[in-house]
Amino acid sequence: MRQYAPYLLLILLFVGLIPLHSNAQLTKIRGVVIEEATGEPIPFANVFFKNTTIGVSAGFDGQFSIETEKATDTLVASALGFYHEFVGIRKGVFQNVKFHLMASEVSLNEVEIFAESDPALIIFNKMIENKENNNPREFEYFEYRLYNKIELDANNVNERLQKNRFMKKFQVVFQYVDTSVINGKAYLPVFLSESVSRVYQRAKPQTTKEIVLASQISGFDNESISQFTGGLYQQVNIYDNHIIIFEKNFVSPVSNFGRASYDYIVLDTVLLNNKNCFHLMFKPRRKQELTFVGEMWVHDSTFAIAKVDMKLAVDANLNFVNDIALSLEYDIVDGKHWVLSKDKIIMDFNMVENSSKVLGFFARRSSHYSDFKFNQPPPDSIFKQPVHLMLAKGHRDYSDVFWDNNRDVPLNRNEKGVYTMVDSVENIPIFKTYADAIYLFTTGYLSWGKFEFGPTFKTISYNTTEGMRFRIGGRTNQNFSDRLRLLGYVAYGLEDQQIKGAWGAYYLLRKNPYRKIGGGFKYDLEQLGQRNVAFTDDNFISSLLRRSPNDKQSLVEGYKIYYDHEWFAGFSSKITFNQRKMYPVGGLEFEIWNGEQYSAIEAIKTSEVSLKMRFAYKEKYFMGDFERISLGTSYPIFELNLTYGIPGLFASNSEYFRLIFQTKQYFNVGSIGWSKYVLEVGRLWGIVPYPLLEIAPGNQTLISDQYAYNLMNYYEFINDRYLSVFYTHHFDGLVFNHIPLLRKLNWREVIHAKGIIGDISYENLHFSKHPSYSYSLTRPYYELGVGIENIFKIIRIDFIWRLNHHDHPETQYWGIFGNLQFSF
């Protein structure tokens, strides 16, 4: 059964907004304290409920928020040099409060105090001095129990959606609307997951393993989602010098060089969880830097962090992210070990910066850590597992009684309602229609029972060989089998009047670690030299957006079988046997030198076996129904491809050996954005016809391809050895953020450079007759470009300049390219 729960949030995003009303049981208050006379905020003002100890300190900007079940009917604000102010409160609802404090007439005698240094800096230096002892990661072995809760909420709700005709059938969801004290936005919970895990850490070699013992997820029947309900994908350590959020390096307030980025202020000494602590606030020294603003409590004898509450600095510009709030609590175990005991992260996402009208969503994660074990080696079998995260057998089979007894914090009313709400929505017939429409839009496939038709964008296309081309195909889904997938298509061209097509199948032996066996047959046109990641010619968009005719294809007939094996997390290998016949089309011929002259051959026939090895240290994945999607790694990724052409096997007429090595990496460049490089080197040993040589990847569409040379034509450069380098840097608004209009439009700057150099042996240059439009790379080829991209990185416009010094008639020119990064 396909899962429809993920589409609830997307339906809300497509339709509009959600009605504004709240049914919260808690008293939630958000407000600000300002000076009556000047209107300026009063930093560090005390805000508390009358006759209670429930209260908070306002921040640097005078803002505060309180959430409690024990509210009284009066809220008080006080600050040194000001009269108290009292405001009436309605219990059990959300409300905004604004205090206007009047300056008191009490005067104090002047007192001069001399100190050797700023007390805040003394405490900071002590924190850094004791950092190694207090960092929870500093154990040879470390083990603990983890309770994790993740929630997604649609936010920015108002009355428009209630009146929208598309949502008339979904009135059941409105009773669960609540309001956030972080920013006052009304929200609707649409997804909830819970898990109980056991986590094991080892210092040498550094390894972390997590076993998810129990999990439950609202509206999902997909075991793969359970891997993201654990804790390995969302960890934050305040003691790190940088806290990485969405691949950005934010300076931690406990960084060794924190004093260069933050100002620290001591507010008071307080008793927190029976521990005497210094209460400090911190704020960025400069604007437009990746920093936080917040407060922390430092233990007075060990100088360990007991608690920290912080938010992104107001001008820290992240794509789609309006706000992030983090709360971390630490405790001391066995009288000597400081460990993280609780943490909570709330992220506010929206397509429009700081919008209160456009529908966005909250992502919340709260974790509780307990049952700690220090320097006690676990069974050897734990660290011998090939993957970092394991799902225990029967982890989704636990009853409500189990969860009632194993939650560290009970669910509130709205959280309990998520499970009921999602089940109710899925039973509404029109919800399936909406979900199918969104699935079609995002994947290109139309669901029908156990089968999915598509990709729909390949139904009609055009090329010079076939003329108008029509194609129909599809694949099976999980309703057919959750291990076996069948796929195929049939195509027909009006010009050549030939039926073409392909079919294939693969079977998942295991999902974690990933192991797959498959095979298939193909009889169709193919653009040789085009990368597998390229924007394919077989779709209507590339047919329309073309800068020159698509007349360099070959007809390929062949089959392949393969086996994909993940040995351990990050390292996999794939072995493939491929038998192919390549036929010339469009009036072209394959001509081979027979010792006296060039003579045409019917087809180039090959039989080859290849081995691909891939290593990506600490790479994270999302496992879909059948395919695994990489979530990336901050370390370099290495790939090695070895191929041997077997002469004489199935009439193969070529013997060769091909080696391709590639390394690539995404990495942050301080606070000025992030970069990506791809370095690739290739070599072919043997004497073969030109279609089997190394064809530099060109692009004859107006859609830029990050893995091809966008001003290079297909077959323009042919080599048997080459070295290529791609480099791209995304500034993420480094300049545009300072220009109000461009900041509002959320466009980003990007620059890139590509280069390739190669050569071809005399034997391969003369063994077959090369096309008249093909050359060898005796000197380097370069492309330099600057561009702009929208915040979604879906639309990108590049201005590209080409430079290539050789006898090619088009040595230099430039072009403008657009890029639509959909999943075609």
Image: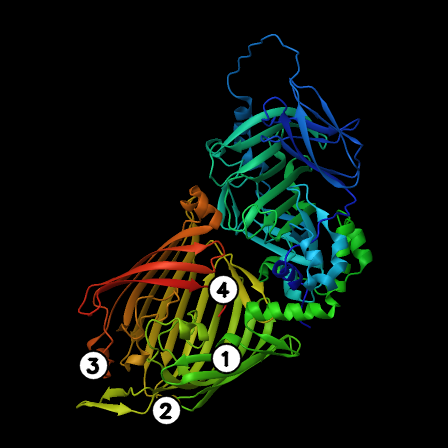
Question: In the figure, 383 relative to 700: above or below?
Answer: above
Q: Residue furthest top?
A: 109
Image location (x, y in percent) of residue 474:
56, 80
SS for callout 2? helix
Residue ID for mark 1? 459
Image location (x, y in percent) of residue 339:
64, 41
Residue ID for mark 3? 766
Return the disc, 4 or 1, that comes first in the chain's sequence.
1
Amino acid carrying mark 2 in the image = Ala
Return the disc, 1 or 3, that comes first in the chain's sequence.
1
Crowdedness of circle 3 by 10 Å Cα count: few (<14), some, many (20+)? some
SS for callout 4? strand
Which sits in the foreground, 573 or 29?
Answer: 29
Give the number of the disc on residue 651: 2
- Measured Cα–Cα span from mark 4 to mark 1: 37 Å
User: Is mark 4 in CB contact (under 8 Å) with mark 3?
Assistant: no
Give the number of the disc on residue 277: none
SS for callout 3? helix
Amino acid carrying mark 4 in the image = Phe
